[in-house]
Image (cartoon, coloured by chain):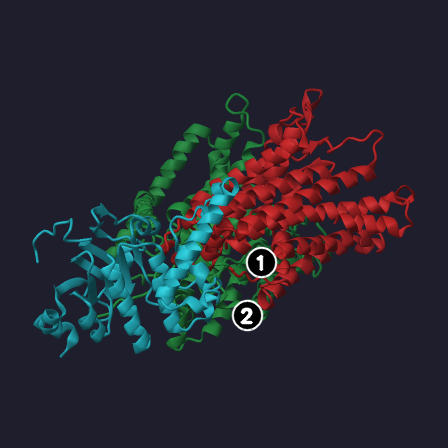
Amino acid sequence: MSAAYPLGPNAILEVREIEKSFGGIRAVDRCSLVVAPRSVTGLIGPNGAGKSTLFNIISGLYRPDGGEIWFGGVRIDGLPPYGIVRLGLAKTWQIPHELKKLTVLENLVLAAKDHRGESLVNLFFNPSGIRKDERRLREQARSILALTQLSNLAHEEASSLSGGQKKLLELARVLMTEPALVLLDEPVAGVNPTLAASLMDLIEQLRQGGTTFFLIEHDMNVVMKRCDTVIVMHQGRKIAEGPPDAVRKDPVVIDSYLGG
Amino acid sequence: MRPLARRAATKKGGDPAAVDTGILVNVAFYASVSIIFAVLALGFNLQWGYTGLFNAGIAGFFLLGAYTAAIVTTPLDPPTIVGGVVIVPGHLGGFSLPFAFGAIMAMVVSGLAAVLIAIPTLRLRADYLAIATLAFSEIIRRITTNLDTVTGGTNGITKIPRLITFDPPNPFANAMVVLGAGAALVLAAFLVLSFIEESPWGRVLRAVREDEVATMALGKNTLLFKIEAFGIGGALMGLAGALFTLTIPYLEPSNFAPALTFSIWVIVIVGGAGNNRGAILGAFLIYGMEWASVILKDYVPTAFKNTIFYTRLMIIGVLLIVLIIYRPQGLLPEKRRVLK
Amino acid sequence: MVEPSETEPSLETRPHGFRLSPIHLTAAVRRQILRGLIVVAIFITFVAVLAAIFGISILQYTRDGFRVSAIVIVAAIGLTLIYGIRGFANFAYGDLMTLGAYVALFVNLNARLSIVWGAITSFLVLILVGIVLEVLVFSRLEGRGPVAPIVASVGVGLIIQNGINAVASTDQWLYSIPVVGDVPIVPGLGINWIRDVTTFAVGFSFMASVHVLLKYTNLGKAMRATADNLELAKATGIDTKRVTYAAWAISCGFASTSGVLLGLIGVVSPQMGIQYLLLVFAAVIVGGIGSAYGAMLGGLVVGLSQEMVVPLLVWLGEPDVIGLPHADAYKVAVPFMILIAVLLFRPSGIAGRQTAIVPRGVVTGAIAKALAARRAPIGPPGSDQKGG
């Protein structure tokens, strides 16, 4: 556990000795971990372990007090969130942040990284290119909506979606950014079991296609069934990692979290 | 706007030349100034109604545009010196360029100022932004009042050339020309704004207003978008300033007090934040109140002449309070947009 | 052990509560007092240097600076109270100051009573005004974000200012007070009983009473708690309604007093208060929103910087230097620049969440820290959503 972590094919994401405090409280306390490419890696731990905070740090929303984060060979701590997304790392929200007044389709098209219509200069000098982009990206959005079973809601205002549908929208939006690594913050919390299963099936399908998933979850069934590797955090640092079965039986983990 | 004046003409019986042009000039003036307020409101609407940036320094950008246009278009006006004492300071000028150039320079200067101010302040939360922009507006006004050699100080800039000089002078024709130019400009502004607001760029702005953090997390450099929106809004305010110079005999700093900024707030709130049609309508309504109060002044006993003016401002104050509490979305709500 | 909640990052931060430490004479407090004395010594040296450069007249400007500071401090304490408890910048505050000055004027001239009675009446009237404002307007805007109350306060200001214009005309008035000349202290410096002694005395007594209120009274403690965290205060049984009314009462009362003081050192005119509005905002933000002590420090900084820069400006205005016309009119630019610098580098102000009351290394440390924190959108305030 104290060996240096090599980059390259063995790790798409590497967190090194990350620290973050709020006021006097250490939310993340020299946390180090590694996520393997094309994996579905779970992050578990009791409430207050620092999991969501770590995700916010990785995605650039918080600046760490110390440590480094490496993604695909590039150091990303300190980059603004939009830079990190452009590199291929995107995060969903634990509580969905759908853009309420936009339609579902607009929510997705907005997430595209390379829409020329978002540049003022292009707006006036390349209107046809913009029309092409809009058409192409709407098509792309529709196919993702089909994947996430939201097609019939394409023109509904995002505020009218149910809780489970909003979670699906979170995932769909993130997929629109063509990520190599997706951070999922409790992707199936509050979602009915059937929908949850199809969501996780979709994730597995996408993983086969080459996307890596790093997810926070409290639902142990999901974690045990769907994750290749599980990392356990407690009080701001990693206390265990390994395949689900091993972690489940780890006495350190049981002590702090599972409680039997 | 234009139809308003024509309707008045035909009402009186057909031949415009026979009509009492005094009333028409007055109405044309009302419409022109309403248009100026409308352009200001369109600019503020983009900044606040659309992007959520609360600008309390509208008067400052308006001032920059007006003075830039005046300086660019006026002929040289040397200082008046009597017995070695400067009575009327001259101002920077002597370029005598056409109005179009003045308008473009006004937009550039105000737009640039808006961008420069935006860069450090747009990260601030709304009340800090309000204070910072108010401070900017007051600093600009104070500099204008005191930098005599450039701006003419409290005496201001005079002899601003009209758009077309009629010989012999014809106030009616002048008024019509200004009205025509204003109508064309506000229409152009409206169309351009509609175009960019319906565009993907505008979509990002709407997302920023609603949830900036989520938009950032979707890979957008939200600060850049906010700066762009603020800059375009500022340029529009500069354009309004240029138009303003056509409607007044001379330009001086007291026109640009914060009360102007607050009037634009009322206009945009009345018309519905985010709604450009509402902004234009609101401008005609609110300025209509002021214009009406000026006319009423003549029919009121002397003791109350000024009271009308103050009452109008108090009404605006009450409007602000009542609207923000009970109907902040305005009289005309924002259009529902649906992607097809 | 308190566990951090896994909160979503938010760009909205509420203004901070009041910062106060119990003043037992511990070693820490002794150190603070020592630091304070050092600051005073530095200031005196600074003035001495300026006197060497610009002549003994600098003392006049220093006195002017303290005069302005006293008024700004009283006003800033009132403003920061409402900023901390109701969470918004009261843009009507300048007009409330003006209203206070006019009520005192009315009592002074029409009822032919001493200005002291005028000031007392004004204080009471403004307390009433504050409570009415809360009941009619601002209580209905709770939870609507920082922009809606600003808009409403602008409306209130328009009503007050134009009401005054309509009733009392735009003329300038003077209080009916005994005319007193300056008493020379040293060559180049005169102290005026009314303009200086009264202002300083009122300023000090108000500062002291606020200190006593916040530290020793239950109401004061309740106010601090409410400003810190409204929900928590409600949950712990504090009557936040009563606290809010008290805050409005004190805020508007202080506004009236600072308005009267302003009228004492100058004239009473409808624009008198709004001319000071940005200065008072500057003092509040420099000192840290919600901090009464911050308001005192901020007021000092703002007042002194504005007045003591005048000799420099006059020198700059001379034809062979820059030849800037009306150079002394730019003196208000100095507090504005300080305000903008604070907004950019340390928006939480001097007495914001992280510093001691007597600032130590505040500038460089703050710039470094804030520059680091500024890159991430969380922390120093970011832009809010559309208010209302």
- Residue A57, percent across and down? 27, 56
Q: In screen coordinates, is B109 left or right of B157?
A: left
Q: Residues within 10 Å of mark 2 (few under 14, many from 20)?
A: some
| Residue at (59, 46) in percent of width and height | B192
Which residue position is annotated with label 1?
A: B273
Which residue position is annotated with label 2?
A: C140
| Residue at (37, 72) in percent of width and height | A164
- Residue B31, percent across and down? 74, 48
Question: What shade has chain A been given?
Answer: cyan
Q: In screen coordinates, is B14 left or right of C349?
A: right
Q: Nearer the viewer, residue C345 or C116?
A: C345
- Residue C116, percent across and down? 59, 59
Q: Nearer the viewer, residue A124 or B77?
A: A124
Subunit ID for the residue under disc 1: B
| Residue at (30, 52) in percent of width and height | C33
Q: Which chain is red?
A: B
- Residue C326, percent across and down? 58, 32
